[in-house]
Image (spheres, coloured by chain):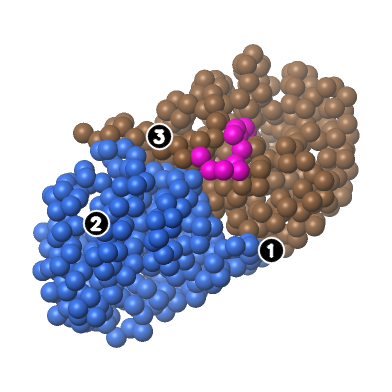
Chain colours: A blue, B brown
Amino acid sequence: MTHPLALPMAVPEKGLPARVRIHEVGARDGLQNEKGTVPTQVKAEFIRRLADAGLTTIEATSFVHPKWVPQLADAEELFPQIAGLPVDLPVLVPNERGLDRALALKATRVAVFASASESFAKANLNRTMDAALAMFAPVVTRAKEAGVHVRGYLSMCFGDPWEGPVPVPQVVDVCRTLLDMGCDELSLGDTIGVATPGHVRALLTELTGHGVPLELLGVHFHDTYGQALANTYAALQHGVTTVDASAGGLGGCPYAKSATGNLATEDLVWMLRGLGIDTGVDLERLVATSVWMAGQLGRPSPSRTVRALSHKEQ
Amino acid sequence: MTHPLALPMAVPEKGLPARVRIHEVGARDGLQNEKGTVPTQVKAEFIRRLADAGLTTIEATSFVHPKWVPQLADAEELFPQIAGLPVDLPVLVPNERGLDRALALKATRVAVFASASESFAKANLNRTMDAALAMFAPVVTRAKEAGVHVRGYLSMCFGDPWEGPVPVPQVVDVCRTLLDMGCDELSLGDTIGVATPGHVRALLTELTGHGVPLELLGVHFHDTYGQALANTYAALQHGVTTVDASAGGLGGCPYAKSATGNLATEDLVWMLRGLGIDTGVDLERLVATSVWMAGQLGRPSPSRTVRALSHKEQ
């Protein structure tokens, strides 16, 4: 009886990018933050389905020590199963040992994980910010020598749970250091989800003002306070064309206290389609993938778009 | 151990309003869409707490026939208990009978509910759009004669579940009709949550282009696809200063299939504070109110900000 309104009406807005590249983090950042471990075959199938849905950059796994992230301890087993897919498959490498493992499997894209705040560097990396950056330098250098593309994640770009608001100039400094080191792109992370659109605009303005090219910048917002999509819209208005998101909102389970609240790829795609911005993503297939994955995890997806569209199908 | 980051860092953005009036709809639109009926005393306490938290416009109840909205059948009992509060307490009146009931209780603000689409007028009001508008004309006229302020809700301003996208000129026509009738303000509703920011901008541009004063326009977004806050941000950029929201996201329970997904007042206040926009709302008190109300309803609040801040307290 009802109209099959599976897509929003496209009403483009002047000044926004014509195309956005989605950096899909569900299989790595998402599953890393889910309770329990997903079987390797399910992960491989998940990544294949994401590629089928039109995602072209799918962060696949992490070569971190299994002691820290047991959920992704199967990286060596998983990666060869998906390596032939016609998409970019970056992998996280925390240090030189991780890089060795990634290079041994012929990964062509890696990501390192830095912090814009002292407290988080201390808590997450057990180092000062400078020491953490010094640890990454040889990782980036060796990756570049091997012809590997390097993404630099920068966490706590807006607020830090110990220090409060993180000063914009401090974030700019770390960004410059990572680019000088040789990173090919950066992802600006709002790890605790406290950013608001004016803050996003201020950071991006300062970065471009300091000569950081916009095309090297991606944004990575968390929905802890419901701000992720509004912040993304502000970033698009500033000209950012790379946005991180997690299929089905994986890793941001709203039923858990520890919810980090990843921006759901489907909610992002809904907005981008409405804005007439090309992503190459087939929303219907993506929703079907997230519904399938929710079934594997045994709980509903926290993505509002997934819930709305999958309820329609029932 | 962690920093008490109960508020975002305020980073104002040029061109945005200095102050926004929140039209709080939780006690009416919210409770109307919740399963089960809340005791009158709890409703009165809820409204008192909302006023204590700094909300100045609190839609209190609806004088609709109890057959249609049994959740609000206690309007006559509730309204006198809260009428003395130093805030605006609009009430919904569907027709002249409802207006009579509201006037008998000395309500000073009423709201009527019109549709921007034929199908929804038919489904919700069992009338054509024109017939529905004709029904409201005497309600508005008599309310104005009694010195009562009239808000006109306009539902389905962006999409309709039967017709699909609703043409912008059609929405502009109905807005003009409601204003010509004597409505003091309008609330543009995205009843099924399909709007995206460019669409919002297009509708507002067309409305102001046709001489509708911005200060008469409020926006009422639903979070069905996660777009409500991004759409609100677009409306603020256009100069809108009245935003509808529901404390704790009441009426938008994410666990129900029928979720309409009201924008949570807390998520809105978080963004507005981050943008340095004054609302007069004490976020801590508001969160405490929504946590208390969630306890009354026996289920957690769907507001991300409520969840994040109340988990911190535990």
Chain part drawn in magenta: B12-25
Q: Nearer the viewer, residue A293 or B66?
A: A293
Q: How crowded is mark 2: few (under 14 residues within 10 Å), some or many (20 or more)?
A: many
Q: Nearer the viewer, residue B39 or A108?
A: A108
Question: Does the magenta-highlighted stretch encompass residue A272?
Answer: no
Q: Name the residue under label 1.
A: B164
Q: Is residue B32 visible?
A: no
Instruction: Please give left or right for residue B130 compared with residue A95 in the image.
Output: right
Q: Can residue B182 be seen in this view?
A: yes
What percent of the width, then of the height, locates residue B83?
A: 66, 17
Amino acid type, mark 1:
Gly
CA distance for labels 1 and 2: 46 Å
Q: Do the residues labelled 1 and 3 touch (CB within 8 Å)?
A: no
Q: At 74% across and 29% down in the image, what residue appears?
A: B110
CA distance for labels 1 and 3: 39 Å
Q: Are marks 1 and 2 on the same chain?
A: no
What percent of the width, then of the height, locates residue B41?
A: 54, 20
What percent of the width, then of the height, locates residue A102?
A: 18, 75
Amino acid type, mark 2:
Ala
Quarter of the image with the N terminus of chain B is top left
